[in-house]
Image (spheres, grey):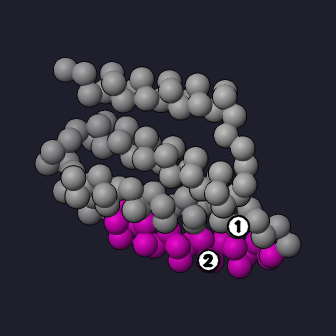
Amino acid sequence: MWIIILLFLANIFMTFAWYWHLRFQETNLWKLILISWGIAFFEYCLQVPANHWGKSIFSAYQLKIIQEILTMIVFVLFAVFYLKEPLKWNYLIAFGFILLAVFFVFKK
Protein backbone atom coordinates (compact mmCIF):
# COMPACT_ATOMS: atom_id res chain seq x y z
CA MET A 1 0.00 0.00 0.00
CA TRP A 2 2.87 2.39 0.71
CA ILE A 3 4.03 2.04 -2.87
CA ILE A 4 0.64 3.25 -4.15
CA ILE A 5 0.60 6.15 -1.66
CA LEU A 6 4.11 7.24 -2.69
CA LEU A 7 3.19 7.02 -6.38
CA PHE A 8 0.00 9.00 -5.77
CA LEU A 9 1.85 11.76 -3.91
CA ALA A 10 4.56 11.80 -6.58
CA ASN A 11 1.88 12.29 -9.23
CA ILE A 12 0.44 15.25 -7.37
CA PHE A 13 3.82 16.97 -7.42
CA MET A 14 4.46 16.10 -11.07
CA THR A 15 1.05 17.27 -12.21
CA PHE A 16 1.66 20.59 -10.51
CA ALA A 17 5.18 20.79 -11.97
CA TRP A 18 3.88 20.24 -15.49
CA TYR A 19 0.61 22.16 -15.48
CA TRP A 20 0.32 24.73 -12.63
CA HIS A 21 1.80 27.46 -14.83
CA LEU A 22 -1.00 27.29 -17.41
CA ARG A 23 -2.84 29.88 -15.32
CA PHE A 24 0.14 32.26 -15.54
CA GLN A 25 0.48 33.04 -19.23
CA GLU A 26 2.07 36.46 -18.59
CA THR A 27 4.95 35.14 -16.44
CA ASN A 28 8.41 34.78 -17.97
CA LEU A 29 8.98 31.25 -19.20
CA TRP A 30 12.39 30.91 -17.52
CA LYS A 31 10.76 31.60 -14.13
CA LEU A 32 8.09 29.00 -14.79
CA ILE A 33 10.73 26.43 -15.74
CA LEU A 34 12.76 27.02 -12.59
CA ILE A 35 9.71 26.82 -10.35
CA SER A 36 8.55 23.64 -12.13
CA TRP A 37 11.96 22.05 -11.64
CA GLY A 38 11.75 22.88 -7.94
CA ILE A 39 8.34 21.22 -7.70
CA ALA A 40 9.52 18.20 -9.72
CA PHE A 41 12.37 17.63 -7.25
CA PHE A 42 9.81 16.50 -4.67
CA GLU A 43 8.19 14.22 -7.23
CA TYR A 44 11.52 12.46 -7.75
CA CYS A 45 12.01 12.13 -3.98
CA LEU A 46 8.79 10.09 -3.90
CA GLN A 47 8.77 8.39 -7.32
CA VAL A 48 12.25 6.89 -7.18
CA PRO A 49 11.74 5.12 -3.82
CA ALA A 50 8.25 4.00 -4.86
CA ASN A 51 9.60 2.37 -8.01
CA HIS A 52 12.70 1.02 -6.26
CA TRP A 53 10.73 -0.65 -3.46
CA GLY A 54 7.79 -1.45 -5.70
CA LYS A 55 9.94 -3.58 -7.98
CA SER A 56 10.06 -6.24 -5.25
CA ILE A 57 6.24 -6.52 -5.45
CA PHE A 58 5.32 -5.56 -9.02
CA SER A 59 6.89 -5.90 -12.43
CA ALA A 60 8.16 -2.75 -14.11
CA TYR A 61 5.17 -2.92 -16.46
CA GLN A 62 2.75 -3.09 -13.55
CA LEU A 63 4.46 -0.18 -11.81
CA LYS A 64 4.14 1.91 -14.96
CA ILE A 65 0.46 1.09 -15.42
CA ILE A 66 -0.26 1.90 -11.76
CA GLN A 67 1.57 5.19 -12.20
CA GLU A 68 -0.40 6.03 -15.35
CA ILE A 69 -3.76 5.36 -13.69
CA LEU A 70 -2.78 7.50 -10.72
CA THR A 71 -1.63 10.19 -13.14
CA MET A 72 -5.03 10.21 -14.83
CA ILE A 73 -6.89 10.42 -11.52
CA VAL A 74 -4.71 13.25 -10.25
CA PHE A 75 -4.85 15.07 -13.58
CA VAL A 76 -8.66 14.91 -13.80
CA LEU A 77 -8.97 16.38 -10.32
CA PHE A 78 -6.35 19.01 -11.14
CA ALA A 79 -7.95 19.97 -14.46
CA VAL A 80 -11.44 20.24 -12.99
CA PHE A 81 -10.62 21.99 -9.72
CA TYR A 82 -7.46 24.01 -10.50
CA LEU A 83 -7.65 24.70 -14.23
CA LYS A 84 -11.49 24.83 -14.19
CA GLU A 85 -11.76 22.72 -17.33
CA PRO A 86 -14.83 20.54 -17.85
CA LEU A 87 -14.59 16.76 -17.91
CA LYS A 88 -16.18 15.69 -21.19
CA TRP A 89 -17.70 12.32 -22.09
CA ASN A 90 -15.01 11.50 -24.65
CA TYR A 91 -12.30 11.99 -22.00
CA LEU A 92 -14.12 9.52 -19.75
CA ILE A 93 -14.23 6.96 -22.57
CA ALA A 94 -10.50 7.43 -23.17
CA PHE A 95 -9.84 6.90 -19.46
CA GLY A 96 -11.98 3.78 -19.63
CA PHE A 97 -9.68 2.35 -22.28
CA ILE A 98 -6.71 3.07 -20.04
CA LEU A 99 -8.48 1.14 -17.28
CA LEU A 100 -8.79 -1.77 -19.70
CA ALA A 101 -5.02 -1.65 -20.02
CA VAL A 102 -4.79 -2.12 -16.26
CA PHE A 103 -7.00 -5.18 -16.47
CA PHE A 104 -4.79 -6.77 -19.13
CA VAL A 105 -1.52 -5.94 -17.41
CA PHE A 106 -2.62 -7.55 -14.15
CA LYS A 107 -4.41 -10.51 -15.75
CA LYS A 108 -2.50 -13.70 -15.14
Quarter where residue 69 is shown: top left
Q: Is residue 75 above or below residue 105?
A: below
Q: Residue at x 85, y 72 (%)?
A: 26
Q: Which residues are magenta?
A: 27-47
Number of the label disc, if any, that sits on residue 1? none
Question: Which quadrant of the rendered structure holds the C terminus?
Answer: top left
User: Label 1 sits on what residue type?
Assistant: His
Tell me whether the residue at label 2 lies in contact with that at label 1, contact meaning CB atoms closer than 8 angstroms. yes
User: Label 2 sits on what residue type?
Assistant: Ile
- Can residue 52 be seen from the camera position used here? no
Residue 92 location (% of width, % of height): 59, 31
Q: Nearer the viewer, mark 2 or mark 1?
A: 1
- Real-space Cα distance between discs 2 and 1? 9 Å
Question: 56 or 10: which is nearer to us?
Answer: 10
Q: Is residue 32 magenta?
A: yes
Q: Is residue 9 left or right of residue 107?
A: right
Q: Is residue 12 magenta?
A: no
Residue that badge 1 annotates: 21
Tell which circle, 2 or 1, labels the residue nearer the N-terminal end: 1
Q: Is residue 39 above or below residue 54?
A: below
